[in-house]
Amino acid sequence: MRPTQIGDKFFHCISCGYEVLEEVMYDVVLTSTLEAIGADLTVEYSNTGDYDFSDGEVERVQCAKCGNVIAEGVDAVETTHTMMLDGDPNFREPQNIREYYPNLVCPTCESPISEEVEEGDECPACGHVFWANKT
Ligand SMILES: [Zn+2]
Ligand SMILES: [Zn+2]
């Protein structure tokens, strides 16, 4: 899984080093289709791992591996972003050229940027030149 990008930085858990954040929600309405309800009330679902959900409130934002809580409450996403701006140690700077680009894709043609791309390289799809200082 690719690291979670927050603004211009990336999550890097100070507890375990994992780089993916997860959002925990509550009061979520989860919908799944039923294959069968047995005589003993055993329920069989037909869309295992493929659910529809809606509503819900953000409870917290945390490390997806160790559960290190970054921010809590309905404003947890906003708080996480603010912590990044304030230089919280759970967030690191980009480590290679592609990490300077939102979603790690080319801003011109939106194709994924290779991990091996170096400063000044061109996008193989459209010729866009990649720079760390992308203004
Ligand atoms: Zn962690
Ligand atoms: Zn491109």
Image (cartoon, rainbow, N blue to C red):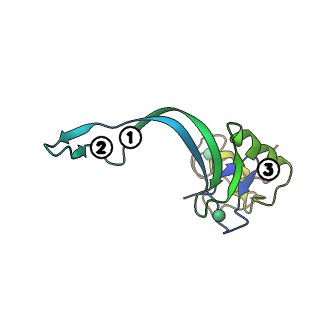
Tell me which residue sits at (23%, 44%) in the image. 43
Picture coordinates of residue 66, whole percent (x, y): 61, 64
Inspect the image, locate mark 2, and give the three-letter code of the amino acid beneath it.
Asn
Q: Quadrant of the N terminus?
A: bottom right
Nearer the observer, 59 or 35:
59
Location of residue 131 in the rendering, given as x and y in whole percent from the top left corner: 77, 53
Q: Say left or right for 127 vs 42.
A: right
Amino acid marked by disc 1? Tyr
Q: Nearer the viewer, residue 66 or 89?
A: 66
- Relative vertical location of residue 92 with respect to residue 73 in this rendering, above or below: below
Which quadrant, please, contains the C terminus?
top right
Tell me the kind of residue under disc 3. Answer: Met
Measured as percent of width and height from the top left, residue 8 is found at: 76, 49
Residue visible at 67% across and 68% down? 17
First of labels 1, 3 by sequence position: 1
Marks 3 and 2 close (CB-CB < 8 Å): no
For image coordinates 71% across by 37% down, the residue present is 75
Give the residue number, with chain letter if any, for mark 3: 84
The picture quadrant for ligand 1 comes to: bottom right
Disc 1 from disc 3: Cα separation: 32 Å
Q: Write down the residue under mark 2.
A: 47
Report crowding for label 3: few under 14, some 14 to 19, many 20 or more residues within 10 A (C-alpha). Answer: many
Query: How far apart are the two marked residues, 1 and 2, measured between alpha carbons?
Result: 7 Å
Residue extending farthest left = 39
Residue at 70%, 67% in the rendered image:
15
**Which disc number belongs to residue 51?**
1
